Image (spheres, helix red, strand yellow):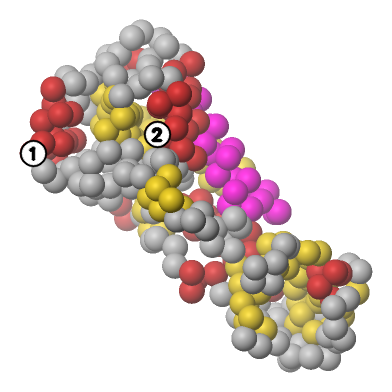
Amino acid sequence: MTNPNVIFAGTPEFAVASLQALIDAGAVPCAVLTQPDRPAGRGKSLTASPVKKLAEKHGIPVIQPLSLRNEAAVSELRDLQPDIMVVAAYGLILPQEVLDIPRAGCLNVHASLLPRWRGAAPVQAAILAGDKQSGVCLMSMEAGLDTGPVYAREEVAIGACDTAGALHDRLASSGARLLTENLDAIINGELSAVAQDDAAATHAPKIKTADAELNWARPATELDRIVRAYNPVPGAWFMLGDERIKCWQAQPCDAAGALAGTIIAADAEGIIIACGDGALRLESLQRPGKRAVTGGEFAAQSDLVGQRW
């Protein structure tokens, strides 16, 4: 790889793989844009983003504006005279005057096969929908939400037991590889971007905690997807009395003849609960403030068979 003048914009773990790949390839960014430090942990102390931590480890200057809609932030970026800005899960909207700064534009590493799953949570959306394939795209950014033309894409299979966490990690690695393989050609104008088919677009909105609630009236296959899609964040959950119980692992299974929410079995293999269609074996559960336990351990705490949740 040549030595382009790159600004990198990213915040969470997904972006770390792409930043590390640029560093390893010798395309060390002239600056890193990342969101401001946020309170985290039980003590709510200000914590740097994963991208900031990696940038500081390599001595890369870090810029953390609250917004990119002020002239001071825009001027600071313009003074860097970048060839390109690489964006991976940055989390702030880039206004047009920022998109116009790099000579070769702004390039987004997006975790879906665009135009499917534009938006904030494409990994979770793909699992929830039962997609068999996900992937990553290198997209030329424009003012619309993930609407820009695509330079390159790579498919990644979604396994029947994949959680969002597992799929996220594979997509991050795939995106990092795709980025370094194509960056020079994009900067040099040797690779053309292909327009998306807007008619085929689907949208992946931001995740809300309420989205992860398990409603036993739904089919077991859908509940299994919810458990996997929201592992690790925010975690699928259901109410048991006044306790919010997290479910980290489950499997659909065959069962019939019981009302949705009825406990059919509870033994060392887990807790089987009737659903609107089929049943779900709960294999990993967590009470508030406690460690996660197996479904068998949870079942041993009380006589559950016949109860209705």
Q: Quadrant of residue 143?
A: top left
Residue drawn at the location 64% of the way across and 71% of the way down: 288
Q: Position of residue 290 (x, y in %)?
A: 70, 66
**N-terminal of the two: label 1 or label 2?**
2
Report the mark closest to the observer, 1 or 2: 2
Q: Tell me the amino acid under the disc marked 2.
A: Lys
Q: Tell me the amino acid under the disc marked 1.
A: Glu
Q: Is residue 15 visible?
A: no
Q: Secondary structure at mark 1?
A: helix
Residue drawn at the location 46% of the way across and 14% of the way down: 25
Q: Is residue 17 left or right of residue 197?
A: right
Based on the picture, tell me whether residue 136 belongs to the magenta stretch. no
Q: Secondary structure at mark 2?
A: helix
The label on residue 71 is: 1
Q: Is residue 145 left or right of residue 307?
A: left
Q: Which residue is mark 2?
A: 52
In the image, residue 288 sits, relative to residue 43, either above or below, namely below
Q: Is residue 188 left or right of residue 293?
A: left
Q: Is residue 41 visible?
A: yes
Q: Residue furthest right?
A: 268
In the image, residue 280 sits, relative to residue 308, either above or below, namely above
Q: Quadrant of residue 169?
A: top right
Q: Quadrant of residue 309?
A: bottom right
Q: In whole angstroms, how far apart are the C-alphas of marks 1 and 2?
A: 23 Å
Q: Main secondary structure of the magenta part?
A: helix
Range of residues picked out in magenta = 158-183
The tally of labels here is 2
